[in-house]
Image: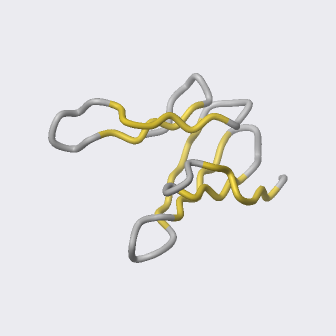
Amino acid sequence: MGLNDNDIQICNITTGMATTTLTGHTSSVLSLKVLNSNGTLLASGSLDTNIFIWNLTTKQNINQLIG
């Protein structure tokens, strides 16, 4: 889920508990999209006008599209 504090939390669907927090945006995260069938790449869009591509295996930002 995207948060107003600029972070993205990945949650366990069974427990509802956050398992990972991705930090990088400088404004509220508005959109998320899983990019591949095995669920390891995530795109996030924010009010900062940037799109980040995340590797969910390594929990790293691997690319940025600066808007």
Left or right: residue 57 versus residue 13 is right
From the viewer's perspective, is residue 4 above or below residue 15? Answer: above
Q: What residue sits 23% from the left and 33% below the top?
A: 16
Residue 23's quadrant in the figure?
top right
Q: As drawn, which residue projects farthest toward the left?
A: 14
Here the colouring is secondary structure
Q: Left or right: 10 with respect to 27?
A: left
- Whether 4 is drawn above or below 38: the answer is above
Residue at 33%, 39% in the rendered image: 11
Figure quadrant of the N terminus: top left
Q: Position of residue 39 (x, y in %)?
A: 41, 66
Q: Residue at x 51, y 70 (%)?
A: 35
> Farthest residue in the right direction?
66
User: Looking at the image, which is closer to me, 47 or 25?
Assistant: 25
Residue at 40% x, 41% y is: 10
* Residue 18 versus residue 36 in the image, above or below: above
